[in-house]
Amino acid sequence: MNDTASLLADDPWWLIAFKAVCVFGFLVVITLFNIVFERRVVARMQHRIGPNRHGPFGSLQSLADGVKLAFKEDLTPSTADKVVFFLAPVISTAPAFLAFAVIPFGPEVSIFGERTTLQLADFPVGVLYVLAIASVGIYGIVLAGWSSGSTYPLLGGLRSSAQMISYEVAMGLSFVAVFLVAGSMSTSQIVAEQSDWWYGVILFPSFAIYLVAMVGETNRAPFDLPEAEGELVGGFHTEYSSLKFALFFLAEYINMVNVSALATTLFLGGWRAPWPISLWDGANEGWWPLLWWIAKVVILIFVFVWLRGTLPRLRYDQFMKLGWKGLIPVSLAWIVLLATVLTVRRETDIDTRTLLFTFAGILVVGLLLSFVWDAVAARKEATKLEVRTAPRQRDAFSGGFPVPPLPGQSLDEPARQPAHSGAAAPDAGTTGPDTAQEGDRG
Amino acid sequence: MDWVPIAWLGGIAFGFAVFSVVAGALTGPRRYNRAKLQAYECGIEPTPQPVGGGRFPVKYYLTAMLFIVFDIEIVFLYPWAVAFDSLGLFGLIEMVLFIATVFVAFAYVWRRGGLEWD
């Protein structure tokens, strides 16, 4: 049992309840903030103004939207499975809140004279708990799509679940490197281990894989295929209206906060102050870390919005290809490489620099080989292409009306002589006797 | 005792979600007609569907199977990663062999086109 766990163990019940209410309130408020933030930022990126009517800078816009949704008609299609249709938003929303429970957002503080730490619960298997709870949230989406008894929601729900489980594999693999280095699955322990270097720096490949996987996992642009309105209307929540729809929306935004908070915890040093501020002694004590933590999460949320404002949506096959053929093999290879490096460092007395240079050398050779491979493949492809689209002669009048030549084609020289003279024979093997004959006739 | 805070948060979250779903049904207007209760298909008559959604592409099923394979691999990787420092060279070799074994299956699926979507 580490410090955090022992600090949490002697919390009185009212403090636990207080922290639970605060976490719940924080998640709801940051969702309201995120929706306005996203709309304002994406509007700036598209040279618009965005919502600015309700409250200062439009900050109450999402509250107004929520109230509006509450007074909308609550429709249930006659083909729906009523009970499951009713339960699906609940199954989707509750795990989204629960996943946040193990995230540490501050060090030891005193609340109403009681020493505690800014974290709701601390388990030795904290990160595994987040993954498990996040998986339960997928049930809500599948069941919502299935229970609607309608075509588009069913397809959207299936797509969504296939997408989330595919990217969950990549996400899970990117954590392995963190556990290897930290030697623990407890979120507070992982934050404590990052006092010198953030894992986002020393385990950069894992961080990069996680960043891609977290966007795929939350169904956000450019991976928002379940909501591809050109193909599937609204995806799994097409048939939902009123507050049921609002709950799905809430769940999506809370999941964004969850994956951002997890990225902060595992890769960006949790609540620890970033470098220039960390030179100040008091930066990692008291209530200040809460500020650093929120700043990091909001920056990651901004990355989500930035991606949405920049990238077009992927096609489904491209998306699955990226997940299964890109992220998963790369993360497996990275884990094996990292484990080998760690073992070599521990078992032998080769110093880190030699090791780094060795691997850099292997990497360079590998890259060179892949360049050569690509060049050879490209040449092969080029010859193939040349054979297929070799410039041909084309009779402009073959279709009965004049057609201009396509790129790479050239027009037939109009024949000066009637066809029987055989003058239009550029493809005839120009052997000696033949030409002589033609010359004779001409 | 560790799980008490989770129970608190879970209670609040479930309570809020159930309250919202019930409240949404009560606060809104109720002016139903036949068209509103039909499944939405962009205005055309909805395609008749058997209960439970009928048939869907088998690819989703394959993806789910592959997911289970890899999820189990991950579940084995986690304890190994946590106990890595005490396992030594033996642990590394064992795990590389395990990853390679699963990777053979992965390569097979890849080569047979199990990962192609069209």
Image: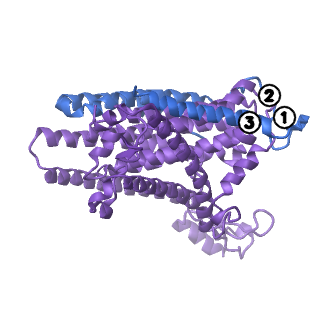
Chain colours: A purple, B blue
Residue B88: x, y in percent?
17, 31
Residue at 51% of width from left, 47% of height from top? A257
Contact, mark 1 vs mark 2 (Cβ under 8 Å): yes
Residue type, mark 2 in image: Thr
Q: Earlier in the sequence, mark 1 or mark 3?
A: 3
Q: Chain of mark 2?
A: A
Residue at 52% of width from left, 54% of height from top? A304
**Residue receiving disc 1:** B38
Q: Chain of mark 1?
A: B
Residue A177 seen in this snapshot: no
Residue A108: x, y in percent?
34, 45
Q: Quadrant of the N terminus of chain A?
A: top left
**Residue receiving disc 2:** A79
Which residue is at the front of the view, A9 or A236? A9
**Residue receiving disc 3:** B23
Residue at 15% of width from left, 43% of height from top? A345
CA separation in Å, label 3 and label 2 = 23 Å
CA separation in Å, label 1 and label 2 = 7 Å
Q: Are marks 1 and 2 on the same chain?
A: no
Residue at 49% of width from left, 56% of height from top? A298
| Local SS, label 1 | loop
Label 1 packing within 10 angstroms: few (<14), some (14-19), many (20+): many
Residue type, mark 3 in image: Ala
Horizontal side of B67 relative to A138 (left or right) equals left
Q: Quadrant of the C terminus of chain A?
A: bottom right
Residue type, mark 1 in image: Gln
